[in-house]
Image (spheres, rainbow, N blue to C red):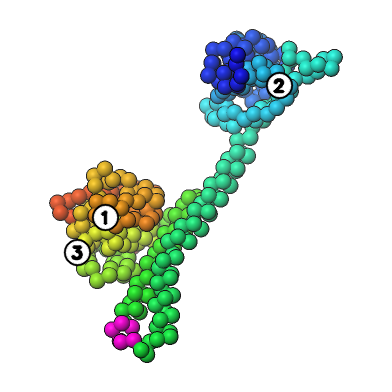
Amino acid sequence: GITDIPAYMATNPAMAHEVVGSATIVAANPAMVSWLGLEDANELLVSSAERNVLKHLKGGEAAVAAILAGKETSGVTQLNMDLARKQIVVQVHWSVPSAAGQPDYSRVILALSDVTEIEATRRRAEELALARSRLIGTVSHELRTPLTAMTGFASLLENQRSELPEPAVDEMLGLIASTGLQMGGLIDDLLTTTKAEMGEMALSPTALNLRDEVAAAVKTVDTMTRRVDLIATDTAAWADAGRVRQIVRNLINNAVRYGQGTIRVETASDGVASVRISDEGPGVPPEHAERIFERDWSSGGNGHKQMSMGVGLYLSRDFARRMGGDLVYRRDGERTVFELTLPTADLAKQSA
């Protein structure tokens, strides 16, 4: 009454062990003996119940039992194998020889090949293809609206500037500059994220002064008339300067887009070097405090603007942790706070 023998064997390991355990290994080549870490082929030439080679294969007994019970004469399957405390991927080819023109199921030939590196290469290719596809899709989606606005204003200025009042011209030029600045940061985030996913992002930590990096980062952000208080003192850190600026820029942009009131940027050193970016906005609900760092996470409820893309915070925390630090979110009284922490450094020794 069993119609799916492989599934039955997979869900009944005792039966699979009984079927395979009744087999006896009658021959094995030197490669198999060496592969299993044995000294002599005789160690294999015993009942499988006493020394079951397939116990190393996850699902191996079920697969071989299905071959025997299913009366298949040849085929190939792929299994994971725990070998010498290392997991490898094994491709199993099987064949049933013929006797007098009929399959002889009293004998089965198994050929095991280590395809771990091949599988790793294949998975890597799939990951790269996915990252490339995600980048193209995200760029297309995220840049369409601001690019349309920029080209619209530029076209209007080119064709009708003489008819427009000077305040309107100044406002359009300001919007074009602001949108261009945002697009530049967005493209930087997208490309950096893709490089990180492909394993091509290298960090170059050095001793640096967070005060200088924060001040430089603030200049690259369009604060949209929002007030930014920079309260920075000499703060030595061991980090990648470019990535620190990118994190600070992302956090200020986040405060501009989703926060309220004055934005405060502070540096401090207390065992670790830190940068705190805070604003007077309501923040996010407690249940979302960790989810905001997920890639592509979005939330449009509770009076918050819809976040179109979760790359900025996701990327910032990832970089912080790669540099030996962290990025956390919390509420401090009436303020929403993002705090970047980094390892400290001795600037005096570095300059010497």
Whether residue 210 can be seen here: no
SS of the residue under disc 1: loop
Q: Quick check: marks 1 and 3 in contact, CB under 8 Å?
A: no
Task: Kindly identify which numbered label has been placed on residue 51.
Answer: none
Residue at the bottom extreme of this rendering: 162
Q: Residue at x 36, y 49 (%)?
A: 297
Mark 1 and mark 3: Cα distance apart in space: 18 Å
Is 141 displayed left or right of 251 in the figure? right
Task: Give, as a three-letter code, the residue at label 3.
Answer: Thr
- The residue that label 3 is drawn on is 262
Q: Residue at x 34, y 78 (%)?
A: 172
| Residue to which mark 1 is pinned | 304
Badge 3: few (under 14), some or many (20 or more) residues near its Cα, within 10 Å? some
Q: Nearer the viewer, residue 157 or 34?
A: 157
Residue 264 is left or right of residue 98, and the answer is left
The vertical placement of 293 against 174, above or below, is above
Residue at the disc numbered 2: 72
* Left or right for 46, reference 12: right
Which span of residues is magenta-colored?
A: 164-169
Q: Nearer the viewer, residue 202 or 186?
A: 186
Q: Are the two marked residues, 2 and 3, in contact with CB atoms closer than 8 angstroms?
A: no
User: What residue is rendered at 21% in x and 57% in y?
Assistant: 281
Q: Residues within 10 Å of mark 2 (few under 14, many from 20)?
A: some
